[in-house]
Amino acid sequence: WQRVLGWAKHTGKIAYGGMWAMILLSPLSLIQSQAAWVTRTMGRGDEFYVSRELIQAWQWLRISSPINSVILPDDIWVGVWTPPNSGRHVWIGHDHETPGWKGRKTFLQDLFQTQDPQRVRSMLNETKADIVVTTSADNGMFMHRYAAPVWQVTKVFGSVVIWTKAQD
């Protein structure tokens, strides 16, 4: 019993010291992670900005598109925010929620670089998306040039355009 009591006292001191270390170091860790987040390179600079047009498009999608629609956004960041704002599924969104995210990211980039209308339409079919949302004038022109008339403008909110596949 004496050995067990000695072990318990020794272990208790380690646990007690560990508890104080966590109490004292946790705020430092939190401050460090927040500082890293705030000072990180922002990339495009629009990670926290959502245009009025995009909000209107999401509202329209929530009200006017079938609930089981799959949306192909032209921008991955838009794909991240489309499900919570429209109530619809996306072909690519959060990297941890999208199966094969890296491959889909490359596919999306390749899609909007392709200049063969037949290949563009084939790639759009591969996604099995019902709706394409373009958020830039360049990608809107791309769809006009390479995806029409199979894909047609359904609704326009400024630079945000909602495209649906033409009925056969």
Image: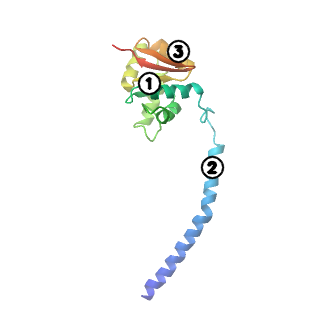
| Quarter of the picture holding the N terminus | bottom left
Label at residue 141: 3
Which residue sits furthest bottom?
2
Q: Are marks 1 and 3 in contact (CB under 8 Å)?
A: no
Residues at marks 2 and 3, CA–CA distance in whole angstroms: 40 Å
| Quarter of the picture holding the C terminus | top left
Residue under label 1, please give it.
Answer: 64
Q: Nearest to the eye among marks 1 and 3: give it.
A: 1
The residue that appears at 62% across and 45% down in the rendered structure is 37
Query: At numbered mark 1, what does the secondary structure look like: helix, strand or loop?
Result: helix
Task: Please state which amino acid type lies under the numbered disc 3.
Answer: Met
Position in image of residue 151 (x %, y %): 42, 16
Residue under label 2, please give it.
Answer: 34
Residue 90: image quadrant is top left
Residues at marks 1 and 3, CA–CA distance in whole angstroms: 24 Å
Residues at marks 2 and 1, CA–CA distance in whole angstroms: 39 Å
The residue that appears at 47% across and 80% down in the rendered structure is 8
